[in-house]
Image (cartoon, rainbow, N blue to C red):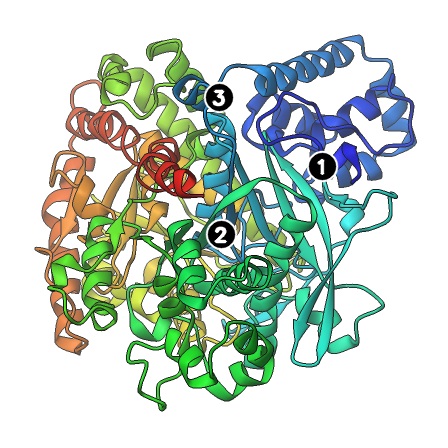
Amino acid sequence: MNTSLLARKPGSPTVPVSSSSSSASTIWAELESIARNLHWSWDPPAARLFAELDPALWEACEHNPLRLLQKLKPTRRQILESDRVLRARIAGLRRRLKQYLARETWFARQDGGRTTGQVAYFSMEFGLHESLPIFAGGLGVLAGDHLKSGSDLGLPLLGVGMLWHEGYTRQVIDSSGTQSDRFDRRRPDELPLRRVTDQAGRPLRIGVPVNSEVVWVQAWRLDVGRVPLFLLDTHLTDNPPRHRRLTDRLYTGDRDMRIRQEMVLGIGGWRLLRELRLPVAVCHLNEGHAAFCAVERMATLIEQERLDFSTAARRVAETTVFTTHTPVPDGNETFDPALVARYLRRYVEKLGLDFNEFAGLGRIDPSDAAEPFGMTPLALRLSHHRNGVSRLHGRVSRAMWHGLWPSRRVDKVPIGSITNGIHIRTWLHPRMGELLDEFLPDDWEDQQDRRRTWAAVRRIPDERLWELHQELKRELIDFVSRRAASDRNGDRRSPPSPAINLDPNVLTIGFARRFAAYKRANLIFHDLRRAERLIASEDRPIQIIFAGKAHPADQAGKELVAKIVAAAAAPRFRGRVVFIADYDMAVARHLVAGVDVWLNNPRRPEEASGTSGMKPTLHGGLNLSILDGWWPEACRDGVNGWAIGEGLDHDGTPRADRRDARCLYQRLEQDVTPLYYRRDADGLPREWIRRMKESLAGIPAVFNSHRMVKEYWRRYYAPALRKG
């Protein structure tokens, strides 16, 4: 194997070698080597340096440091090359990266070198940074945060995903408010990727059998701090076009293409790890998209160790972790059994089963031939470690999948829960980070999952916290204005935006997430007159910033987008409602840092977790949310935010929507806006600031991905590794 790519065990202190042809002594080679490890994306000094090389070009390159370095003009390069301060800063960043990769980690202290195996984290999408658009939304961002915390903590972890050449949709809004979808192709040489090669230095290729054909797969390595992420790619000339296009777009609606994509991820991913001879002993399947990994593992055991199916299935299940993210049956991936038979019949033969037996693995009722083949039942049956992503979601999942264990009581169904968390450094505004550095203990980042670490935020002077919050809000408003100007100039092919009258002194609400019907983006406009009284109030107005995409095939979601765009253009709302097109991680970082209130009003219990609401709390933002997902675990009503309603499930009727809308209006009218506008003689909203501090002191300590990953280690990874 190519030792530059494969010899390093995840966690070992080796700095990636730049592939640049430039001399290693030049600043450009050093900058490229920094850019080729995504640690820069959560290291504020590194991100700031790239941005300062050419601020306009940085924005044009969508914060991609490799594209920035490729496109810098010769005159700008000459100026930078003569800058001694810049050279010193670059040297300092190189030292920071080396120190990060070499320092002792939480895992090293806890484990003491006892663990030899590794955990492979399979996910269809990874949201690591906006410059690497291989994700669609929350599931991918969660996966990216998981790898980042795995790196910070030093876990023996690696990732397996897909290199989506056209990524997910780029949202374009036309003059009628209708979303259309654009797909921009990315070149691998513009991304921090290195091709995986064999011992002779040739690109490594893996064959994935689909029916009587073979899909050839190559792989790329991406370094996420200490954690390597392997991305699978079918863009090879040896593949016919129908297979070559498999890694074009994420979440295509073509069912034939989708099942082949999931075979590439699960089967191809496991074959790659075996070919690389990495000591992977446990597989973590992030959602059911990767469930075919367990099928490939069973087939390998049966073929190589001459095991029977039951023994192979038990061995695989003991070393498989499965996380489900979908709390409604219709949201779980299913396939027509005929399609499964077409592409997986050879695997059925390898497993020693007839097709009905194999199809039964993917059904709640194995004997029901009319039931489609489900990836979630398949993953649940072939894993012994299973979890939802919040306590409520765990309960919902146990009830939803009770049919797989019909002899057990619902509360004894073996599906647990580990509540999601966020990677704090990724989502923390650098200015807020400086304030926390001043008041929290020196080792606060290492101790971020302890409540006592955050208690000191209550000592931050009200004036300091409020002044910073207002600065971040002004920064958000400036960003929104620039995006609106860009839209008017036609850069994003969007309609002319209404006048932006956002005011930093006005209560500002953020709503940003995937536009799906159950998330009810337009709930606040359920009663237009009441909404107008709130938004256009003379003495206590509010302003709302919306962002989010609908899936290209989700017509109901696109209709929601159109309704919000129409509301933003309505004269009655006087420019106090804004929709930001083409929501991505960069937009999200501005929003979560600058809003006063984060609004979330899904149909309970259809929000599995909802990590977006955790991010504003890092900046003192307050949540106003239905008691769904993570919020029932965090909400101290009226202390660190507010609950909408009393935690009643939605029954699917318009009456429930009316009930939730009334509760939303009541909280805004009676609690939120009066508190925000209540000022003392110094002009400060002291009671509001007190709640900001309670939000900041209590929520990040629990709802961070360090706590989450440690919980996965203790409850699932370590026991599974002992079996493996």
Q: Nearer the viewer, mark 3 or mark 2?
A: 3
As shown in the figure, which amino acid type bears the numbered disc 2? Gly
Q: Position of residue 499 (x, y in %)?
A: 48, 54
Task: Say left or right for 379 vs 206.
Answer: left
Q: Which residue is mark 3?
A: 113
Q: Is residue 168 visible?
A: no
Residue 76 percent location from the top left of the image: 85, 27
- Callout 2: 10 Å neighbours few (<14), some, many (20+)? some
What residue is shown with label 2?
Answer: 140
In three-dimensional space, the C-alpha distance between marks 2 and 1, rounded to whole angstroms, equals: 25 Å
> What secondary structure is found at the residue carrying circle 3?
loop
Crowding at mark 1 (Cα within 10 Å: few <14, some 14-19, many 20+)? some
Task: Give the residue at mark 1.
Answer: 6
At horizontal 18% and vertical 63% (from top left) the residue drawn is: 530
Q: Is residue 387 visible?
A: yes
Mark 2 lies on a secondary structure that is: helix
